[in-house]
Image (cartoon, coloured by chain):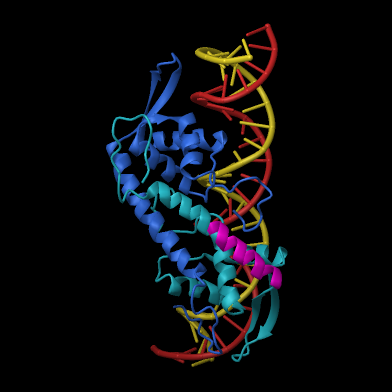
Chain colours: A blue, B cyan, C yellow, D red
DNA sequence: TCAGCATGCCTAGTCTAACTATGTATGCAT
DNA sequence: ATGCATACATAGTTAGACTAGGCATGCTGA
């Protein structure tokens, strides 16, 4: 992310958020990896993209933690795909994960919000609105 | 961060956000590293904490990128501390960094928000409100 | 007095997550 | 049949947040 580092094309996921995003998509609908990648781009209006080298390892982590189950299924086109579905433990983890993510990013936003009281006067105490 | 991983005491910074948070604090008031660490805890009401092993490397990165300047100064207590202040380039990077961070976390929030339309019906198209 | 603690800075090494690059295979359209 | 989108996977790189130390100083209380 490194702040105006951006020589790379598109912004990436802050560390830790990818598992959560994928889990949330799977929670809405069981689906396969490749489609998850395209959903990420669609839903984010192209603001986010998952590389396959991030996608599949992430799905493996979720599976290893038993937050999702994977099952080979034959599609209508006759193609074999790996369908991921959320487990009960996954639903719990998702709820908790969203909670924590929201809390942390909320706290961070507090630092970054310059909306008001940007200027601080002579006091040696930094003030926040 | 890894979602309910949390055996460690307190939540940490999503990768990439620390530089931005520190830069935003320095932008409000030039100050030294140790105090930045305590400000982080104060301002976040204890929800965030920076370890010193993250803090000083982060400040070095900011310095290397010329987003901050460092200067040894003697405090009233007679103690020598390293005061960091933001540069013009730092202000630009801060603005852009906040912009990007907001965009990315906003996009992610779109995935995590289950506020409404959590249930998706039979369609093979995932819907988002 | 001097022991301990908070202050203050720093680095070496570990861990992990997101990445790049690559390899494989199949269905479909031209 | 040639290429392209689909679909899955792994090996290796990179980078950032961490753990675990080391060092030095000022103040406070027993």
* Residue in front for this viewpoint, B27 or A119: A119
In which quadrant will I find the C terminus of chain A? bottom left
- The vertical placement of B114 against B51, above or below, is above
Q: Position of residue B31 (x, y in %)?
A: 60, 79
Q: Is residue B90 magenta?
A: yes
Q: Is residue B45 magenta?
A: no
* Residue in front for this viewpoint, A119 or B18: A119
Prevailing secondary structure class for the magenta stretch in the rendered image? helix
Residue A15 appearing in the image: yes
Q: Which residues are magenta?
A: B88-101
- The vertical placement of B28 against A90, above or below, is below
Q: Residue at x 34, y 45 (%)?
A: A94
Q: Position of residue A1 (x, y in %)?
A: 59, 53
Q: Position of residue B72 (x, y in %)?
A: 69, 80
Q: Residue at x 54, y 41 (%)?
A: A49
Residue A52's image quarter? top right
Q: Residue at x 30, y 35 (%)?
A: A87
Residue A66 appearing in the image: no
- The vertical placement of D2 against B89, above or below, is above
* Residue in front for this viewpoint, B41 or B20: B20
């Amino acid at each position: 992310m490194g702040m105006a580092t951006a020589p790379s094309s598109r912004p990436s996921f802050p560390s830790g958020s990818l598992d959560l995003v994928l889990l949330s998509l799977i929670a809405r609908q069981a689906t396969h990896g490749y489609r998850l990648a395209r959903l990420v781009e669609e839903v984010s209006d192209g603001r986010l993209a998952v590389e396959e080298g991030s996608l599949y390892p992430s799905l493996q982590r979720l599976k290893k933690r038993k937050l999702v189950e994977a099952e080979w299924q034959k599609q209508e086109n006759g193609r074999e795909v790996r369908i991921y579905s959320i487990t009960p433990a996954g639903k719990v983890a998702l709820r908790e994960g969203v909670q924590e993510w929201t809390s942390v990013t909320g706290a961070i936003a507090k630092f970054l919000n310059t909306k008001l009281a940007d200027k601080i006067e002579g006091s040696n105490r930094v003030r926040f609105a």
